[in-house]
Amino acid sequence: MASADQQPEPASGARTAYDPATDSLRFTGEVHLRNIRQLTFGGNNAEAYWSYDGTQLVFQSDWKQINDQGCDQQFVMNADGSDLSSGEKYQLVSTGQGRTTCGYFLPDGRVIYSSTHAASPACPTTAAERTRSYVWDVFATFDIYVANADGTGQELLIGGEGYDAEPTVSPDGKYVIFTSTRSGDLELYRYELASGETIQLTDELGYDGGAFFSPDSKQIVWRASRPTGEDAETYRSLLRQNAVQPGALDLYVANIDGTNKRRVTQLPGANWAPFFHPSGEKILFASNHHTMAEGGREFDLFLIDIASGDLERVTYSGTFDAFPMFSPDGTKLVFASNRRGDRADSRDTNVFVADWVETPTPADRAFTTR
């Protein structure tokens, strides 16, 4: 049960007054979040991203209730949890074959995503299975596709030898940014949708990935590793096995042509899944820097000011909070989490949507959970 000394005013656009007693998914200290709603209910559901009109979300899932294939597939759902026009809650967008990752909407309502299905309809063997260690997959069979939101009209957009994945689209609809191994390392590339022109944006050893555009489409933010010495040799060795070992990751920003690169975070642990604040002056991201002494298993969301480096913690679930994205109008936040309303431990990762409170009230700061 949640309580506060007084109720805050309704969030912008809210139809009814906010009742903290019903906000069971909100944790003490989460002053920027209200009305947290859970949209998936089992398995692993993550990387949920908004449509341009703010009404739908695309996400990846291995939840057996909607996906019995065994590998992550791409789905679309309404952001308010209502039924789609088909009468279903969730619509498969990808082919249902291979493994997919990183779905994102285009301005015309189609979805861009990465998939291995052209190489094989089966789930590919994971790097963790091959190396018997905790590593991330960099499947050389990932290519980038587009499809209608109902799964029809599948087309190859970006392909070729090596890993092509992690695509996101600029708010002005002109560009796709993605990560590729076409140079021999994991680097960022920008693809122009109108012409197909592709330019390389990064060129330093390490994993440059997970990039997003600023609200004005003039900058990018991404997470990167910069291994040296023995770590560099380990990185190269794993990459030859189509894998990377997540560890030290920091955030960087640059202009969309790759110029004016600068490092934003200098924190221990993994700092990743960044997304620009609606102002364009801050970055919201996931990090375990504050739990490294306890093994770094807890990830929370943090907000950092690009210019000053001022850091503010946003989530306090004590579990796993990651993959944040602001809605196009900046009033809502979607993210993935292991949180539960009953506070029980869970290995399920689900998709949540919350109202974003830019300026917390005294009641927001007094909010507590029992």
Image (cartoon, rainbow, N blue to C red):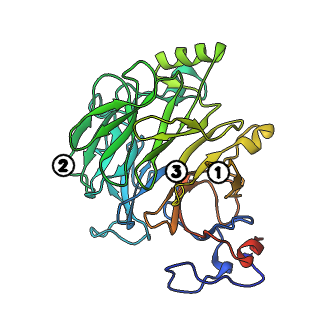
Q: Could you tell me how far apart the alpha carbons at marks 3 and 2 are, in whole angstroms?
A: 29 Å
Q: For this rendering, which residue is in front, 11 or 319? A: 11
Q: Are marks 2 and 1 in contact (CB under 8 Å)?
A: no
Left or right: residue 13 compared with residue 35: left
Q: Is residue 334 above or below residue 357?
A: above
Q: Are marks 3 and 1 in contact (CB under 8 Å)?
A: no
Residue with the mark numbered 2: 153
Quadrant where the N terminus is found in the figure: bottom right
Q: For this rendering, which residue is in front, 143 or 326? A: 326
Residue with the mark numbered 3: 275
Quadrant where the C terminus is found in the figure: bottom right
Residue 117 pos. (x, y %): 30, 35
Camera-nearest label, 2 or 1: 1
Residue 85 pos. (x, y %): 28, 70
Task: Report the residue that reaches farthest toward the left.
Answer: 153
Left or right: residue 194 compared with residue 172: left
Name the kind of residue labelled 2 in the image: Gly
**Element class at badge 1:** strand
Q: Is residue 345 above or below residue 81?
A: above
**Element class at badge 3:** strand
Residue occupying the point 71% across, 58% down: 316
Residue 241 pos. (x, y %): 48, 18
Name the kind of residue labelled 1 in the image: Ile
Residue with the mark numbered 1: 304
> Of the residues under marks 2 and 1, which one precedes in the sequence?
2
Residue occupying the point 59% across, 25% down: 226
